[in-house]
Image: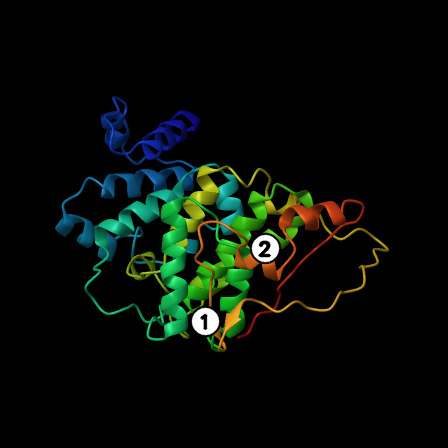
Amino acid sequence: WPEVRSMLRAFLAAPAQEHEFLPRLLKIKRVHSDCYIGLCSLGYLSMLFMSSQRRATTLANTLFGSVPLWDQIPLAYWDTINSQWPIFSLLEMVSHEVRSYDSDSFCCDHLESELDMSFHTIVHRQLQSGDALPVASSMAYLAESPSRCSFGKATAYLSAAQRLLGAGSPRLRHAAKDLMALGEAQLDRCAVGQNLTVADQMQSKWPFWGVLRRVEGESLIQMNSLQVGRTPPNYSAPRLTPARQLPMHNGSFALQEEVSGPSAEDTALPSLANITAACEDRSVHVAIAGDRR
């Protein structure tokens, strides 16, 4: 299995190239194994090389598409990524093959408002450019979002988690884990009274799996969720400073679009580097918990 995982990561690093090991991977038959993530990864890899009709049938009639992701991989997103299996990268690639861009938005996308459309556009732009989305931009969108679950809010939480993980500070790791858990909850519980399947999520136009692919590809998670630091005994939190206004414009989400010069995050919030330096001698835990919006 470690060799299979290495081959999968090599394929995903350059999917357009020829890989001599690829026929071997596609010929591996399902065997009795406890490595459920490895089996799922091979299943989604094979879907990339199916005809569209066969792929649709597979998603509709097998466990690869007809059940929630939790039923396939009973781990939190954090621990799934920590396993080093590139499952979210594979899910993103398969979703590109099955998604119909001309169809109406999926029920949990909520792309009918200008707020959602503007954030959707900037997230795609940031992913294409390779730049992480500023934390303040995600927070501004979340602050203005209506009181309902949505895949847009999931994308915002996961983008904020990616940005905090990218800072490379142990002080921000716990906050990133909380944000990722909130994003995961938005994806799993969006449709009330309905278990959202993997096939359902593949119809979404929000790039939440693209954000998780970045976390996977950059190896930003190197420990399981139980190893992430807890608040030490007798900890006394520092006093809160007055809140700073997030970048809004006429009550709606806004993001500075200049390529150079100070960004919205630079002007509205202290930089991650400054946060880390200012809190070097104490445990800082930024949590957005119990989100019931």
Q: Amino acid at mark 2?
A: Asp
Q: Quarter holding the N terminus?
A: top left
Instruction: Please name the residue shown 55% across and 57% down the image.
Output: 135
- The residue wearing badge 2 is 266
Q: CA distance from mark 1 to mark 2?
A: 29 Å
- The residue wearing badge 1 is 149
Q: Position of residue 267 (x, y in %)?
A: 60, 59
Q: Position of residue 199 (x, y in %)?
A: 29, 58
Q: Amino acid at mark 1?
A: Cys
At numbered mark 2, what does the secondary structure look like: helix, strand or loop? helix
Q: Is residue 173 above or below residue 189?
A: above
Q: Position of residue 5 (x, y in %)?
A: 40, 31
Q: Rate crowding at label 1 as few (under 14), some (14 to 19) or many (20 or more) other CA atoms within 10 Å.
A: many
Q: Quadrant of residue 204?
A: bottom left
Q: Position of residue 141 (x, y in %)?
A: 49, 67
* Sequence-earlier tag: 1 or 2: 1
Task: Name the residue nearer the viewer: 239 or 224.
Answer: 239
Task: Name the residue nearer the viewer: 214 or 276.
Answer: 276
At numbered mark 1, what does the secondary structure look like: helix, strand or loop? loop
Q: Quadrant of residue 100?
A: bottom left
Q: Is residue 223 above or below residue 201?
A: above
